[in-house]
Image (cartoon, rainbow, N blue to C red):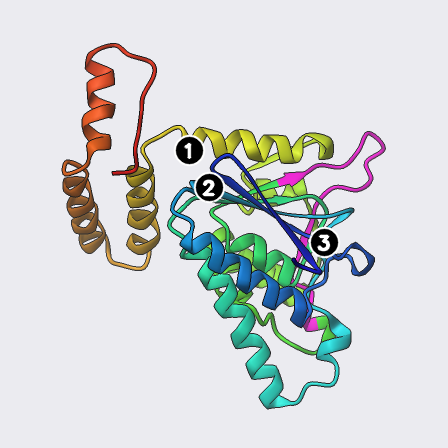
Amino acid sequence: MYKTIRYEKQENIGIITIDRPEALNALNSTVILELIDVIGQVEQDGELRALIITGEGRSFVAGADIGEQSTMDVAAGRKWGQRGSALMRRIEKLEIPTIAAVNGFALGGGCELAMSCDIILAAGPNAEGKGGAKFGQPEVGLGITPGFSGTQRLPRRVGVAKAKELIFSGKQIGAEEAKRIGLVNEVYAAEELLNKAVEMAKSFTANAPIAVKYSKACIDRGMQMDIDNGIALENELFAMCFATEDQKEGMGAFLEKRKEKHFQNK
């Protein structure tokens, strides 16, 4: 169905793989359009409980396609940036948890794609110290700024000063440094990365889906508010949980000392 991505489901977990290894999975118009299409499917899939995004080969996404961008004028550049940013925002606003399993280069648009996910897991280097995930926003070396919202998400992830250092220098950092500064949650051996992402996704999907969805909403929306409005939002969504069957099942299992729970997403 798709030329540059693959999409599969493992039970209630979706897995998107950027599959353009001959170009290190660089984002061109085709990749962007196919991602827009598959995210539309994800948004409409009521059975899905988590989503993983990864890359084929030795790259997650090495950036946006420079050949395609090199001939753009101001109007085309604006449209390109708006389209990519809108895609990243749709991923960020998904109600289900999202995990970026960064298997290699995550530069420019690749770093921005990873940051649109809730969790970033990264591949560490091999025994010889080679390979592994590499993160960076190198756009200034090409005469442009980050275009898919990197100037907005990176400081929210790692702080303003560190984001400025990374963006102004355009330097790349490895998985361990990315974890140290708070960009990455965990680092795993490359051969374990996807399995670890699925394992983490299952730890999310084992819980009440509505409670997970509401918790994500509280965090994401609350971070854009002052703390009093954020607390008020949490209070309201906490209260709404008591109208769900899943609350009755979860608390019932606890009181009955029952390990097995049957959440129904209602």
At label 1, counting other C-alpha atoms closer than 10 Å, the crowd grade (few under 14, some 14-19, many 20 or more) is some
Q: Secondary structure at mark 2?
A: strand
In the image, residue 131 lies in the stretch drawn in magenta: yes
Q: Quadrant of the N terminus?
A: bottom right
Which mark is on residue 205?
Answer: 1
When asked about the image quadrant of residue 10, the answer is top right
212 and 243: which one is in front?
243
Give coordinates of residue 166: x percent, y percent. Answer: 62, 59
Pointer 3 local density, CA inside 10 Å: few below 14, some 14–19, many at least 20:
many
> x and y percent of residue 124 in the render?
71, 36
Residue 18's place in the image compared with 123, above or below, is below
Q: Residue at x 71, y 60 (%)?
A: 3
Query: Which residue type does callout 1 highlight?
Result: Thr
Q: Is residue 155 visible?
A: no
- Between 215 and 182, which is closer to the camera in this rendering? 215
| Label 2: how many Cα within 10 Å (few below 14, some 14–19, many 20+) | many
Range shown magenta: 122-140
Question: Amino acid type of disc 2?
Answer: Ala
Quick check: 76 left or right of 261? right
Q: What residue is shown with label 2? A: 50
- Give yes or no for residue 126 being in the magenta stretch: yes
Q: Amino acid at mark 3?
A: Asp
Cα distance in 3D space between marks 3 and 2: 20 Å
From where the camera sits, is residue 171 visible?
yes
Instruction: State yes or no: discs 2 and 1 in contact (Cβ < 8 Å).
Output: yes
For marks 3 and 1, the one nearer the N-term is 3
Where's residue 49, x and y in %? 42, 40
Instruction: Say the numbered circle drawn on residue 19.
Output: 3
Question: Residue 201, image x and y in percent?
Answer: 49, 35
